[in-house]
Amino acid sequence: ESVMVEAFVCHLEAVLQAGRAASATRKRLIRGRLIIDAGAVGGSLFRHLPTVKNITSMGKAYFPELNSTVTIVNAPWIFAKIFSVISPMLTEAMRKKIVILDGKFEGGLKTHSGLNVEVL
């Protein structure tokens, strides 16, 4: 678990620094759009729920405005159930940033994040 959390924090820090540099250059706040492909996630996710909760808490506490949107694509139906367990730990603003989409996600991706599927 610690290696996974450390890698995630390093990734968030890199995104934060890139966003700061882009914001300074453009003289406006630049935030990221996180796309998570959950297509290959299986039953082992349940075993890692404490890690997911830990990562979510860290993101909320230390990187709250890093991403403008978080879009989970190719999500199995169970993701909506898991999100219903995790979402009470999130602020309303954070819940609005997150959308969970199934395998036919192209339209939802564009609507939520403004990104076309071709950029993935």
Image (cartoon, rainbow, N blue to C red):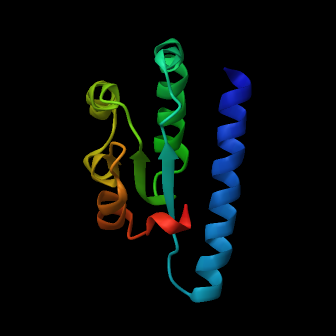
Image height check: is 61 above or below 105?
Answer: above
Q: Is residue 49 left or right of residue 18?
A: left
Q: Quadrant of residue 21?
A: bottom right
Which residue is located at x 36 percent, y 59 percent?
106
Q: Position of residue 53 (x, y in %)?
A: 47, 26
Location of the C terminus by quadrant is bottom right
Q: Nearer the viewer, residue 22 or 98?
A: 98
Location of the N terminus by quadrant is top right
Q: Quadrant of residue 72?
A: top left
Image height check: is 52 above or below 28?
Answer: above
Q: Is residue 57 left or right of residue 113?
A: right
Q: Quadrant of residue 107?
A: bottom left
Image height check: is 24 above or below 9?
Answer: below
Can you name the residue that lies furthest to the front here? 104
Q: Position of residue 79 (x, y in %)?
A: 35, 30
Q: Nearer the viewer, residue 47 or 1?
A: 47
Q: Nearer the viewer, residue 65 or 105?
A: 105
Which residue is located at x 36 percent, y 31 percent?
76
Can you name the residue that lies furthest to the top here? 47
